[in-house]
């Protein structure tokens, strides 16, 4: 499976500020997603990061709050804008990989706390 | 009704016993099913996937799928303390890799 690195691994931010999370994959991947895991809850898909075009957002998530870039097939960023304490979560980058039998794999995650 | 439901646990089993985890899903047309293991403070790790009705075994893990009952389970045989984690059931409803996850079952294996 691909090696998926995220930066930062954790951060503590003040409300009203923004944080950009980076996701780097060691090989080219077609499909890349961003998930959120709120405290004590399961994973929720935020959006699909599309290479060279605007991201596709799931219900309840909007571009103004979670702008996403994907300039190439190995890199993406997720920005959490105008943060509030409710944005405190783990944010996970995920990619489809595994050769002929492709599956969804997750990056190391970014633990975000908003004060 | 939630798309994917799991027993929340926690599930406590003695070392060497079988841990049985259950998951139901709402979309009858779903075709692909996954089990992820998540250690505390870590990201989810894929441990099993199953597409066809019946059992699929991989080492100490067995996944079971019954599409008629919309039910998928995970058995962990000869449970070890290192199996202590939260296990997430995930369903790919539309074969587009956009997985729907259950809330997870926390398993504790007692030494």
Image (cartoon, helix red, strand yellow):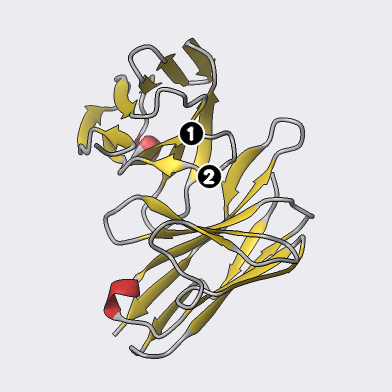
Viewer-side residue, B94 vs B86: B94
Q: Residue at x 47, y 26 (%)?
A: B30
Q: Residue at x 31, y 19 (%)?
A: B18
Q: Residue at x 23, y 28 (%)?
A: B13
Residue holding disc 1? B93
Q: What quarter of the picture does the C terminus of chain B occupy?
A: top left
Q: Is residue B43 above or below residue A80?
A: above
Percent position (x, y) of residue A98? 71, 39
Are the residues under badges 2 and 1 in a single subunit?
yes
Tag 1: Cα neighbours inside 10 Å, few (<14), some, or many (≥20)? Answer: many
* Residue B110, visible in the rendered structure: no
Q: Is residue B62 left or right of residue A73?
A: left
Viewer-side residue, A69 vs B23: A69
Tag 2: Cα neighbours inside 10 Å, few (<14), some, or many (≥20)? Answer: many
What mark, if any, has residue B110 been given in the picture? Answer: none
Viewer-side residue, A5 vs B7: B7
2 and 1 marks in contact (CB < 8 Å): yes
Q: Is residue A115 left or right of residue B52?
A: left
Q: What quarter of the picture does the N terminus of chain B occupy?
A: top left
At numbered mark 2, what does the secondary structure look like: helix, strand or loop?
Answer: loop
Q: Quadrant of residue A94?
A: bottom right
Q: Is residue B6 above or below residue A41?
A: above
Q: Quadrant of residue A21?
A: bottom right
How far apart in space, not on screen, are marks 2 and 1 (Cα)?
A: 8 Å
Q: Residue at x 36, y 20 (%)?
A: B70
Residue holding disc 2? B98
Task: Of the two numbered discs 2 and 1 on the same chain, state the one appearing first in sequence.
Answer: 1
- The chain carrying label 1 is B
* Residue A68, visible in the rendered structure: yes
At numbered mark 1, what does the secondary structure look like: helix, strand or loop?
Answer: loop
Percent position (x, y) of residue A97? 69, 43
């Amino acid at each position: 499976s691909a090696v998926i690195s995220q930066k930062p691994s954790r951060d503590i931010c003040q409300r009203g500020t923004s944080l950009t999370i980076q996701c780097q994959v060691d090989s080219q991947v077609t499909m890349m997603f961003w998930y959120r895991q709120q405290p004590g809850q399961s994973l929720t898909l935020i959006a699909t990061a599309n290479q060279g075009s605007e991201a596709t957002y799931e219900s309840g998530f909007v571009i103004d709050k979670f702008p996403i870039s994907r300039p190439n097939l190995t890199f993406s960023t997720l920005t959490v804008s105008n943060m509030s304490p409710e944005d405190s979560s783990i944010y996970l980058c995920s990619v489809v990989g595994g050769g002929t039998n492709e599956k969804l794999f997750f990056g190391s995650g970014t633990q975000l706390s908003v004060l | 009704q939630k798309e994917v439901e799991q027993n929340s646990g926690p599930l406590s089993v003695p070392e060497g016993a079988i841990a049985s985890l259950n998951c139901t899903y709402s979309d009858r047309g779903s075709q692909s099913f996954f089990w992820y293991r998540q250690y505390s403070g870590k990201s989810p790790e894929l441990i099993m996937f199953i597409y066809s009705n019946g059992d699929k075994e991989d080492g100490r893990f067995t996944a079971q799928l019954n599409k008629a009952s919309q039910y998928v389970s995970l058995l962990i045989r000869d449970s070890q303390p290192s199996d202590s984690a939260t296990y997430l059931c995930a369903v790919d409803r539309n074969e587009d890799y956009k997985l729907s996850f259950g809330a997870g079952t926390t398993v504790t294996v007692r030494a």
